[in-house]
Each structure stands twice: as C-alpha cells, then as structure tokens.
Amino acid sequence: MAITVNIPPPLRPYAEGTDKISLSPADATTVAGALKVLVTRHPGLNDRMYTNGQLRPFVNVYLNNEDVRFLDGEFDAPLKDGDDVAIIPAVGGG
C-alpha cells in the first residue's frame, strides 16, 4: 500500500494534470512532509498553496476525511501506509 495525496481539479493544471501522487511511508512521515514532497514534485503548486512558507488560509487539508486542524499536532500528524491526504480549496460565493 501507499500514502495517496489527492490534488483537486483547480490545482491540477499546476501539477501537469496529475490528480494524485503516491508516496511510500519513507517518502513522508507527516502530513507536512507529504505536502512538501507534493510541491517538490510539482513546483507550480507552491505559489498556489503557500505564502511566505505558510499554507494559505483557503487551502484545507484532510487526513483520512478528518480536517488536520482538528488533529493533535495538525500538520505534524503522522502518516502510515494506506493513509489518504486530500487538499480541498475553499470555495467562495454567495
């Protein structure tokens, strides 16, 4: 098994059209590590996801369907084989 990082449709053009990447637990041990691998493999995502080294406020990240902001350690939450990381950009409108 692997860790899957899902890329949402609005960000796929900056990731060469890729919808997900697979990582081994050795590639990334935390959610923050998985996101770092993602922007390393697809540098076009960096400016869309980060400002001054911080994840932009409208970028939500889920680990196995749980918002990482509600997990202990947030982005330091550990990853294991079979985990699913999803990036969900906030949608505005009214």
Image (cartoon, rainbow, N blue to C red):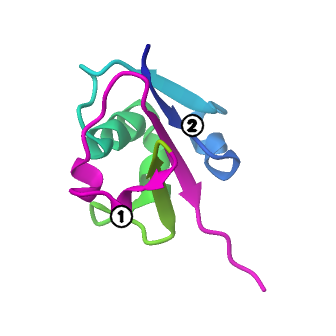
- Residue most extreme to the bottom: 94
68 or 44, which is in the foreground? 68
Asked where in the image residue 25 lies, by quadrant, the reply is: top left
Q: Please, what is the three-letter code of the amino acid marked with disc 1?
A: Arg
Give the CA distance from mark 1 to mark 2: 25 Å
Q: Please, what is the three-letter code of the amino acid marked with disc 2?
A: Ala
Q: Which residues are magenta?
A: 65-94
- Residue most extreme to the right: 94
Local SS, label 1: helix
12 or 6, which is in the foreground? 6
Residue at the spot x=43%, y=40% of the render? Answer: 43
- In the displayed structure image, the side of residue 45 where residue 19 appears, left or right: right
**Which residue is disc 1 drawn over?**
69
Asked where in the image residue 13 lies, by quadrant, the reply is: top right
Residue 39 percent coordinates (x, y): 40, 41
| Label at residue 61 | none
Residue at the spot x=43%, y=24% of the render? Answer: 82
For the residue carrying disc 2, how many other residues have a C-alpha within 10 Å: few (<14), some (14-19), or many (20+)?
A: many
